[in-house]
Amino acid sequence: MLIANKSKFFEIIFSLYNRNLIKRRFHSLQISGLDFLFDKHLKIPLIIYCNHSSWWDGLVAFQISYEANLDSYLMMEEKQLEKLFLFRKVGAFSIVREKPRQAIESINYASKLLIANSQKTLWIFPQGEILPNDSRPIYLFNGLSRIIEKVAQCLVIPLVIRYEFLGKFKPQIFVKIGEPKLIFVDLNFNAKDLTERLTIYLTRTLDELKKDVLNHNTERYKSII
């Protein structure tokens, strides 16, 4: 697998480039629920799991992480990370879901990162592929639950992204961050059951974001770009 090779200097430079790129291609990046990320003081690992509807998702995730001053790592398909190898400098590491042994290696790597430093944040797109926002039902890989099992206790947050043309020349990005769930692993832990619960939570948050956009109920969305 390809491990992360973070560089604080590169993160600063990349954040300036990325912010300018998003600003040129989109009218705005608006987020609901951002306060929790800015106010996170708990000494417990944070896992943010997201829907995956666009190539832009990783860049949006990076910018949100940077604005919130999170020490983030991102799980990324190895074939994509091989092409975009500089992403390793902002915390990306690889996974090959089609090969169970390699997938387990990535799950173990992600778990060790969070266990070693409780202030780290893991971003993960557990759908495993780019799919339309309104595609139902949503399916998540069990890797997310396996990481949670190994970490034993963590905060888990659904973060959903939607790209919309709403009367502007350029599309707008809307992001909704769900309420954090504190998860403790006990003897009754069941990865499949947790995956189902996390899937329901992600689906509900996606539906709430869609409803907000359709009803123009965006006054609680804060623009960061």
Image (cartoon, rainbow, N blue to C red):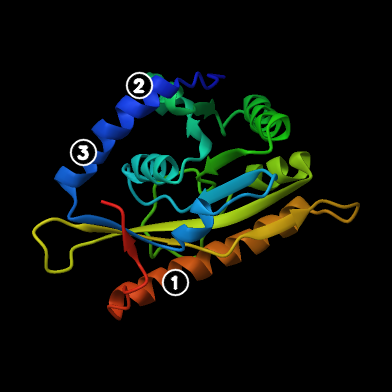
**Disc on the earlier residue, 2 or 3:** 3
Left or right for 166, reference 110: left
Front-most of 79 and 123?
Answer: 123
Amino acid type, label 1:
Asp
Q: Which residue is outermost to the left?
A: 169
**Disc on the earlier residue, 3 or 1:** 3
Indicate the quadrant where residue 9 lies: top left
> Would you place residue 132 above or below residue 79 in this image?
below
> Would you place residue 218 above or below residue 158 in this image?
below
Residue depth check, mark 2 versus mark 3: number of the one nearer the observer: 3
Q: Residues within 10 Å of mark 2 (few under 14, many from 20)?
A: few
Left or right for 150, reference 180: right
Left or right for 2, reference 85: right
Residue 217 % position (x, y): 32, 78
User: Badge 3 is on which residue?
Assistant: 21
**Disc on the earlier residue, 2 or 1:** 2
Mark 2 and mark 3: Cα distance apart in space: 19 Å
Q: Which residue is outermost to the bottom?
A: 215
User: Badge 1 is on which residue?
Assistant: 207
> Which residue shows up at 73% across the image and 54% down it?
192
Mark 2 and mark 1: Cα distance apart in space: 33 Å
Residue 163 % position (x, y): 28, 58
> Which residue shows up at 88% across the image and 56% down it?
188
Mark 3 and mark 1: Cα distance apart in space: 28 Å
Residue 67 % position (x, y): 39, 44
